Structure formats: structure tokens, C-alpha cells
Image: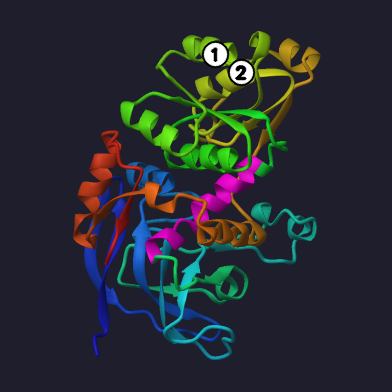
Amino acid sequence: MATTMKAAILHGREDIRIERVPIPEALPGELIVRVGAALTCGTDLKVFRRGYHARMIVPPALFGHELAGTVVEAGEGVSGFAAGDRVVALNSAPCGQCFFCGRGQENLCDDLLFNNGAYAEFIRIPARIVAKNTLHVPDHVPLEHAALTEPLACAVHGFEDSRPRAGDTVAVIGGGPLGLMILHVAALAGCEAIAIVKHDGQVEAARQLGAAHVVQTTSIRKAIRETRALTPKNRGVDIAIEAVGVPDAWQEAVELVRKGGTVNFFGGCAVGTQVTLDTNRIHYSDITLRATFHHTPALCRKALDLIAGGRFQAQAFITGHAHLYELNRVFEKLMNRSSEIKTAIVP
């Protein structure tokens, strides 16, 4: 039996190498999973560009975090999982003991445990993630669809955190994978979804995923004007969700909402970024500002249920397939604003 596997190792900025490393062994409480599909992600693209992630990965390190696969080994003490089980293992798990976990804010856990290594033939799942955030995949759900559970959980969190009501008009700024997921979730929830995008491929995707209207422009002023024009008396949308992570888009979101509306700063900007907002408008228009980060175990279960239920168009988000050795090429395409939403890496 083989003792080594192929895995992507991040060595630094735009430096991924496919190397042979030892196949991990399961310690007590852990699982070893044969990766069926690992998906590309905007966070992974940022890490590829920067060469590190302060909270999740310090090179040289195994890379990738959206995956689903099949259990090949269960460590001592594991109950509920056995060899042959199809599973989706999330990229993190909260401690369950800290102040934030006690308040139901597990996404803010003081000891949030992250796991990387999805771009490989096998991955070790730490005991805490096995216990709290590893889920059985129904037989009818393809593994590459199940691998969408983690980003979808983040999207559901961002949408629900905005306190929507059925029939609300929701504008989503950004046509990347998470922007499109939030848009789709909003449409499925009975909201009138408006997509604000830049590129041609994003227009078609947004329409397929339920956008009632698509505003395509590179001009912020034009985006604000055209989006407000889609609402009665130009009053603005009920909810604006920023899913890009740049200061201009944060400012744009505030200008899109009506009096009494809600803005969700979902897209994370770089450390140290400062944003100037119109405090007069925020105060006298009674605008609620929110920001949403990551996911919780409950949201992960809700996301997998949404995928398994069939209404969520999982297949629309998997727009490419590649082998592990093609990973560098895949990220280079994504850096050049490829029309791909997510590529399934199949080890």
C-alpha cells in the first residue's frame, strides 16, 4: 500500500508546488478522507497572491479548504463515521467553551480551529472538526456539490444576518462566487434580487441564479443611479450586501439603501483599510450597518440541506474541472479574471 501522496504545498507568494508527502494517519478522534473534489475559492486566491494567511496558513503548508470525499480511516474513539462514508468536512470548528461560543457566536470563537490541505489525495480531519463540523453526504449528492457547503454556509450567514423579509429588494454588489451565492439564496428566499456586476460572464450567471435585475457597470455612480431607479420613487433597496471587499464598494452599499434599510459589509477588506461614510445619511436615514464573518456549525448543516434539497443550483457554481497538477494554471486563470466561478480539483 502506498505511503505517500500528491499534495499542493504553498511555499510563498504565487508559489504552489505539487509534492509527494506522507499520507497522514488518523490519531484518536480523527478521520483520514480521500478527497473526491476540492474547490477553488476567493480566499485561496488571496492566499496564493499574498503567500500566506495570518489566521489560517503559514508556508510551507498544505493548501486548500473546500472539500468532500470518502472516509478511508477512522481513529480510535470516532463514532458515527466509518471507512466508506461519504462526508463533507468543514474548514473549521469552534471550541464550544469561550465567551463567544457561549453566546451562540461560534464564528467569532477565540480558539477557532482551521484545517487546510484539500488540494491533495488525502486529508487529515482534526478531532474537533470531526466531532462538530463533519457531515454525512446523502447518496444522491455529488461530492463536488457537497464541497460547496462551506462557502454556502458563509453566504447563508451573510443573507440571514441582514434580517431579510420575504419580498424585500436585495442588492448584491459583486459577481464572484460568494456574491452569486448570496444572490441565489436571496432569490430562493423570495426576495427581489438585484445583481451589481462588472463582467459579461457574471451577467449571465446572475440571471440564471435568480436575479430579477442585473446592473452591469464599472462606475459606482452609475450603479447607484441605476439600482435606485429599479425601486419605487428611487427610494433605494431594503438591503445592500457588499461582496467584493474594497472600500469603494462599502461606500456604494450605503448609498444604495432606502431610509431604514440595512447594509451588510460581507466582503473583507485588507488589514488597515479605512472607509469614509456619510454619517449624516446613516444617522438621519436610520440605516443599519452590519458585517458578517465565516459560519457556524448550524449554518453548515443548513447549507448542506439546501444543496441536498435540490433547489440550490449547485451545478451552476462548478464551471470547470482540473487535475491536481494543473492547480497553478487554474489560479493564474483566476487572477486574470477568468469567467470560471469555481473549479473542482479532482486529485
Magenta portion: prevailing SS class: helix
Q: Which residues are magenta?
A: 143-159
Q: Residue 64: x percent and y percent?
A: 38, 58
Q: Residue 286: x percent and y percent?
A: 79, 19
* Residue in the image at 43% along x and 52% along y: 314
Which residue position is annotated with label 1? 224
The three-letter amino acid code for the residue at tag 2 is: Leu
In the picture provided, is 278 more to the left or to the right than 178?
A: right
Q: Earlier in the sequence, mark 2 or mark 1?
A: 1
Helix, strand, or loop for circle 2? helix
User: In this orientation, which residue lies closer to the viewer: 301 or 19?
Assistant: 301
- Residue 10 among those drawn in magenta: no
- Whether residue 33 is visible to the viewer of this picture, yes or no, is yes
Circle number at residue 256 = 2
Give the vertical position of 335 relative to 69 (above or below). above
Q: Residue 56: x percent and y percent?
A: 48, 55
Helix, strand, or loop for circle 1? helix
Q: CA distance from mark 2 to mark 1?
A: 6 Å
Give the vertical position of 248 relative to 308 (above or below). above
- Residue 145 among those drawn in magenta: yes
The three-letter amino acid code for the residue at tag 1 is: Ile
Q: Neighbour class for label 2 at 10 Å: few (<14), some, many (≥20)?
A: many
Q: Neighbour class for label 1 at 10 Å: few (<14), some, many (≥20)?
A: some
Q: Are marks 2 and 1 in contact (CB under 8 Å)?
A: yes
